[in-house]
Image: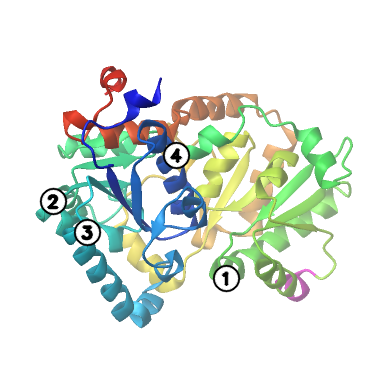
Amino acid sequence: MENNLNLPSKERPLVFGIVVGEHSGDTLGAGLVSALQERYPHAQFIGIGGTKMQKLGFQSLFAMEELAVMGLVEVLGRIRRLLSIRKSLVNYFTAHKPDVFIGIDAPDFNLTLEAKLKVQGIKTVHYVSPSVWAWREKRIFKIAKATDMVLSLLPFEKTFYDKHQVPCTFVGHPLADDIAMYNDKAKARLELGIVADNTKVLALMPGSRGGELSRLLAPFFESAQQLQQQDEKLVLVAPMVSEKCAEQFYALKTQFAPELNVNVIIDKTQQVMSASDCLLTASGTVTLEAALIKRPMVICYKFSPMTYYLAKALVKLKWFSLPNLLMNKALVPELLQGDVCSEQIIPLVKERLYTDQQQLNDSFIAIHQQLKCNASEQAAKAVVALLPSEFVPHAFTSEI
């Protein structure tokens, strides 16, 4: 496709407003910006973005880190600044109207922003659906008022939006695009220096947040100790996302399992998964990564007592892990709250370490094929479909 086919018919360049609130959103945003730049090389991108987006020429009006606040107490402590930033963005985009505004994740911040901009006649997109299908279902009405289009990463999300007649496009998951269909276990072990010929490797993955580590590591360590006693050749590895997490891991290991032999590896989570035979892991996106890497897993989660009480009342799901939700069946075992104990963990891990897992692997391949859709390209197509016809490249009209 020649560049002149990509240029809009109007003299001024297209302007896309984008706001992301954390590093995962920066990755999604960079993929979307890159896909849109292929069609509109003179387009301008402005709002809030991280380093990956800024390397592509994105103009960030505020530091992305200002929005990266988690937890009720932390948000309350920053609420005045967050409201000030949102008001500034509303004023800026009202005065300098973008052709489309895209809020990426950060729903508590972005949905209100999108609603205010939509009232001004600006087309709005929300990229990454909030978990309305799991809890606080009535948020769907706020989303409908705030957006012209939701871009969902998971197919069952689109089914939910279709039921409520809210425009939604399933774009696939970027992890499925980035992770190879086959991951070489022996190669990963060689790269990580894991010597485990004819032995099993179990990865301990208790999450990255302090609360997750403090609640999960005691039962993980107790289970790992007994498993290693039963199989002296069993190799234990623990991928940590940062030095800070590793320090907490070591402190809790000293407290609960000082004699346990485990290799801690920092910032190489996917490689560690590839090198492993089974994962003992916290819930979260990491379980989808594990499914895409095709490794069996036992998934655990423990909330604080108050959070668990509230979640039990509000969340209406058969399962809480993405592999099970995607296949709509108990594909991998889940342990929650009081069930996260060595008596429950050990037999589930042993079954996955020492028995054939080909049937599970076939299901993981099906998940990968379902989600591998070139997410950034599909997201760009959905955004372009909201533009006036004079902005849609002639060679692109057949695609949307």
How far apart are labels 1 and 4 at the CA level? 34 Å
Going by the image, does 233 lie left or right of 207?
A: right
Q: Secondary structure at mark 4?
A: helix
Q: Main secondary structure of the magenta part?
A: helix
Classify mark 3: helix, strand or loop: helix
The amino acid type of the residue labelled 3 equals Phe
Span of residues in magenta: 252-257
Residue 34 tag number: 4
> Can the viewer see residue 104 in this picture?
no
From the image, tell me which residue sits under label 1. Answer: 210
Q: Between marks 3 and 1, how big is the CA–CA gap? A: 37 Å
Residue under the image location 88 percent in, 46 percent down? 233
Q: Which residue is mark 2?
A: 145
- Position of 366 with respect to 258 (left or right) is left
Quick check: can you spot residue 45?
A: yes
Residue occupying image coordinates x 88% and y 50%: 232
Counting residues from the start of the chain, the first of labels 3 and 1 encountered is 3
Instruction: Name the residue that disc number 3 marks.
Output: 93
| CA distance for labels 2 and 4 | 28 Å
Of mark 2 and mark 4, the one earlier in the sequence is 4
- Proximity of marks 3 and 4: CB atoms separated by less than 8 Å: no
Of the two numbered discs 1 and 4 in the rendering, the one whose residue sits closer to the viewer: 4
Q: Residues within 10 Å of mark 3 (few under 14, many from 20)?
A: some
Crowd band around label 2 with a 10 angstrom C-alpha radius: few (<14), some (14–19), many (20+): some
- The amino acid type of the residue labelled 4 equals Ser
Q: CA distance from mark 3 to mark 4?
A: 22 Å
Q: Earlier in the sequence, mark 1 or mark 2?
A: 2
